[in-house]
Image: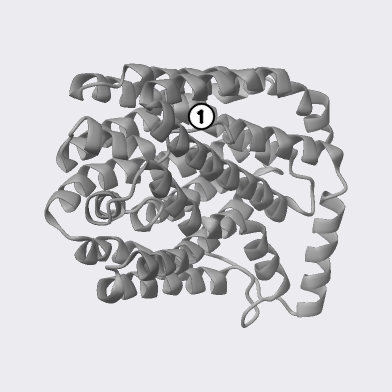
Amino acid sequence: MVESVRRLMFLMGVYYFLQGMSGNAGLHDQALDRFLIQTLGLGAAQMNAFSFLVTIPWMIKPLYGILADSVPIVGYRIKSYFFTGSILASVAYLGIYRWGYSASSLGKLLVVSAVGIALADVLCDKLMVIKGQPLDATDRLQAAQWFAISLAGILTTFIGGYIAEYVPLQRAVFFSLPFALMVIPVTVFLWEEKRVESVNVAAKEAWSGLKSALRLKPLWGCAIFLFLYHMSPGLGKTLRLYEINVLKFSQIQIGHIDTLGSIGSMIGVFFFGVWCKKFSERWLLRGIVVSGSAATLLYVFFRDPLSAFLITFGAGMVGAVAFLGILTLAARVCPKNAEGMVFALLMSVINFSTKLGGMLGGLLFDTVGFQWLVVISTTTTLVMWFFLPLVRERQLNRNA
């Protein structure tokens, strides 16, 4: 069993590392932000609206799970869709090289790349839940995933600052392209999967599991809590605009600041992996609200390079604990026989409400400024303490 968990942790880590390097956020992410702010001249609300639109593929993740379960390609439910996702992201990046200099064409191609990367993410998360629940290892598998994506974050933010400073967006996407393509050989050599004999049986099993899951009241309670928690007006892309237009940070400075945040996030992931087993769901929920509020409140002091370095590091560490707590909560509430689809559904709720919160944050920034945005965001997160009864320990245990 130990060897099985370790192998799964390694596989989860590899896929998430490639995802972080190729497009979530990817080596081209900071160059994209610079292009939107300095070339297209987008404001905070417009930046967050653009971000919302190009991440819509992350909000419909259950559709990918249903598709993969119901329509195996050449007999494979997962391998073939990993290949498909890799090809979609790679073709989109090649397209940006040629047509990436208008908001319209750029947005469309980024949507295509997001479909490819989100598709691979759903398959990886499905394996995490299905394999992790019987082994009581979902927390360790998620820790491996987010340790790997934090490592990718360190590389993308440090290198990405130099890419954004010296390389135009047209060429920046080529730094992300090889990692999108590497999903194919990883799947060929590391993934073991049996061929599906009957497509009809696979489709019936998928739809039956989803319909049964949607009748569970605890699942709806968890979904409502996650939606409200993440709909809090957030910093989102507003922080990047604040760094560039207000604080006048260079792209290299921003890259170094974000690198320290990724290091903090990695440390937070490590501590979560070590200590999470020691806490009940009740204390895990309370910790999510408190740590999430604390991570946001730190930004009220975000005013110069020194404070930016210190706050980004601290917020990265504390924020990682809050986010992994949320992912663990989502994994534990997933009912059997519908684990992958339900987890994808809950992640879609998080993605949608987070982007919606980012749009609200952008509007508030344009209206009341950065400091008041931080105060409002912290307050609305703390209010979620009163919504904790939506997700009760006895309900979670009943579905474990």
Seen from the viewer's position, the closer of residues 288 and 13 is 288
Residue reaching furthest to the bottom: 74
Relative vertical location of residue 73 with respect to residue 135 in this rendering, above or below? below
- Picture quarter containing residue 88? bottom left
Q: Quick check: 343 left or right of 265?
A: right
Task: Give the image location of residue 44, x and y in percent.
Answer: 38, 41
Seen from the viewer's position, the closer of residues 75 and 162 is 162
Reading the image, the residue beneath label 1 is 273
Could you tell me which residue is drawn at 51 percent across and 37 percent down? Answer: 360
- Picture quarter containing residue 184? bottom left
Task: Give the image location of residue 50, x and y in percent.
Answer: 43, 54
Relative vertical location of residue 246 with respect to residue 100 in this rendering, above or below? above
Task: Sort mark 1 into few (<14), some (14-19) or many (20+) by Cα contacts within 10 Å.
Answer: some
Could you tell me which residue is drawn at 30 percent across and 53 percent down? Answer: 36
Quarter containing the N terminus = top right
Kindly identify the amino acid type of the residue bearing the numbered disc 1.
Gly
Relative vertical location of residue 199 with respect to residue 280 in this rendering, above or below? below
Could you tell me which residue is drawn at 45 percent across and 55 percent down? Answer: 15
